[in-house]
Image: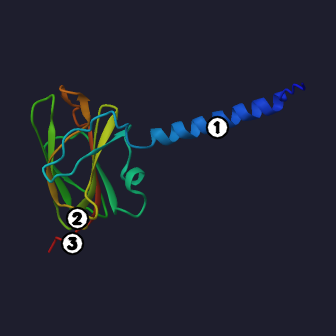
Amino acid sequence: MRVTTRSKRQVWGARLACAGLTTAVALGIAASPASAAREPGPPSAAGVQPVEYDQHPSCEDILGAGAFTFDFRQQPVNDGTFTFDSPNDNGSVTLDVHGPSTAQLVDFTINGPYAARGIIVEGGSSSNFYSYGAPGFPNGIESDEDLHAPVKNIGVGFDNPTHLHVCGIPSNYYT
């Protein structure tokens, strides 16, 4: 019987290939929605179920370039009307934060010739993304209620919203 052994070069080559594959998978998971074991929470008043993302992505990270016109970020998330940045400064978003401190909800209304293709609500170490794209909202949406950051712990409430992104597009509703 003849016994053969692998060369050390082949063994280390295989180990490095596996390490590279493991790293690629880990990076893909970090940039993708959170695992299915986590709970993003209930849908908005318009019936949009949020998708939870690890970390704090931008509109471009989620939708891709060209799927929106501008990414307006509001920090802190509190009551008020906030003007969009130039060249979209002929529009604004009005926010109403309400509910108990352990389960704050955000209502938004876009004013002017814009609509939301998506809204990102950041809180804690993750974010919820509300998609207002086709087919349910082919022209985006101008307002929605009861958006929230991800669930803190099941049965405990939501993380307080710390940032809100409006992934804006021109509105077909504005006259």
Res 151 quadrant in image: top left
Residue 152, position as x, y percentages in the image: 25, 29
Residue 45, position as x, y percentages in the image: 12, 50
Q: Nearer the viewer, mark 3 or mark 1?
A: 1
Badge 1 local density, few (<14 within 10 Å), some, or many (20+)? few
Q: Nearer the viewer, residue 37 or 85?
A: 37
Name the residue carrying label 3: 172
Which is nearer the N-term, disc 3 or disc 1? 1
Q: Is residue 109 visible?
A: no
Q: Nearer the viewer, residue 8 or 152?
A: 8
Name the residue carrying label 1: 20
Residue 77, position as x, y percentages in the image: 21, 41
Which is nearer the N-term, disc 3 or disc 2? 2
Name the residue carrying label 2: 114
Colouring method of the image: rainbow
* Label of residue 11 in the image: none
Res 56 quadrant in image: top left
- The residue drawn where x is 14% and y is 75% is 175
- The residue drawn where x is 17% and y is 70% is 173
Whether residue 109 sits left or right of residue 33 in the image: it is left
Give the residue type that dot 2 points to.
Answer: Tyr
The quarter in which the N terminus is drawn is: top right
The residue tagged with tag 3: helix, strand or loop?
A: loop
Whether residue 147 sits left or right of residue 9 in the image: it is left
Whether residue 148 sits left or right of residue 59 in the image: it is left
Give the residue type that dot 1 points to.
Answer: Gly
